[in-house]
Amino acid sequence: MAIYLDPPLWPAHGTVFSHLVSDTSLDELHAFAATAGIPERAFDGDHYDVPERRYDDLVSAGAIPVEARILVRKLIASGLRIPARERSKALTVPLMERWNSSYPGHEELGLELLERWGADGRKYHSRTHLLAVLEALDLLTEPEQPPRTALLAAWFHDAVYEGVAGQDEEESARLAEDRLTSTGLAHAEVAEVARLVRLTSSHSPSPGDHTGALLCDADLSVLGGDEQSYARYLAAVREDYAHVSDHDFARGRAAVVRHLLGLDPLFHGERAKAHWLEAARRNLAGELE
């Protein structure tokens, strides 16, 4: 087990930064960072960004200095590296292309939503999650296009995020009603988008609610990831609730997992079941255990 640090070469905020990684586990990395006084906000999925002024004292604390290419190799070998396309900050252009395709002529609203999804402090409920939901909608409806109401609901469903279940969905739905009405979208379509956003609070669409089922399946697709993807999802969710004690988080998270395991069905469409149901049940049961 070791902590590695590359040279301060990466410019941002008027200085240059190094990357701090572990070759073994995120737990080891977080423990080292906490001891060294590195703030949680400096964590970016698989590494910490640390300013040049901290380089020498981190080496003194035990971080092993290596070239940037060696650090990347160590991170890949550890299995902890997050692909670039899954990083929230890198998704501005592809997400805006999707927005302009779904709702052309309203780029300003798309940029506002993108800013909300990219707000500091968001780890799981970030642009990465937004893209994952949009891609899941594509997968579930190909070769056809997803309904525009489902696409707009995906963009709005976590646009307001304070970590309060139910309240976040309600505030996001109200935001959708306000912003989409201002763009001139038909009242019936605005109401449908808001309804779909509120539905992501329970993930329990009524029988025959095909669009609602589609959005809920896409939103929960993360549950059916492989072991590493699910572990990254859990780590990001924990960071979203960094202000909550371990005891309270464990109790609350267990309640969420029990709720998800109790959903019958967990996924509604046949494609969603085929893609994610078996893995999702295994992941959730393993987490609860």
Image (tube, rainbow, N blue to C red):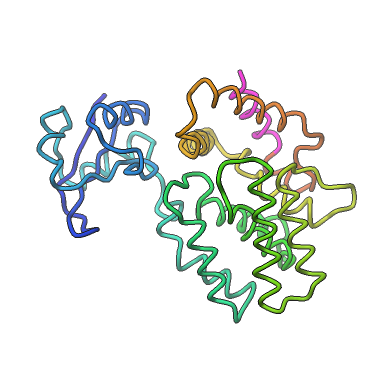
Residue 141 vs 235, above or below: the answer is below
Would residue 83 be seen by someone viewing this image from the given angle? yes
Residue 4 percent coordinates (x, y)? 21, 35
> Which residues are drawn in magenta?
277-289
Residue 243 percent coordinates (x, y)? 46, 33
Could you say which quadrant of the image residue 37 lies in? Answer: top left
Residue 139 vs 92, above or below: the answer is above
Q: Which of these two is toward me, 61 or 170? A: 170
Determine if the magenta segment contains residue 281: yes
Determine if the magenta segment contains residue 115: no
Q: Which of these two is toward me, 98 or 58? A: 58
Q: Which of these two is toward me, 183 or 26? A: 183
Left/right of residue 108 with respect to residue 210 in the rendered view? left
Q: Residue at x 64, y 34 (%)?
A: 279
Could you say which quadrant of the image residue 258 lies in? Answer: top right
Tell me how many marks there are.
0
The kind of secondary structure the magenta stretch mainly shows is helix
Question: In the picture, which quadrant includes the C terminus?
Answer: top right
Residue 95 vs 77, above or below: the answer is below
Question: In the picture, which quadrant includes the N terminus?
Answer: top left
Residue 190 percent coordinates (x, y)? 75, 68
Q: Residue at x 57, y 71 (%)?
A: 109
Residue 262 vs 42, above or below: the answer is above
In the rendered image, the residue lying farthest to the right is 208
Residue 125 percent coordinates (x, y)? 54, 47
Q: Residue at x 32, y 36 (%)?
A: 77
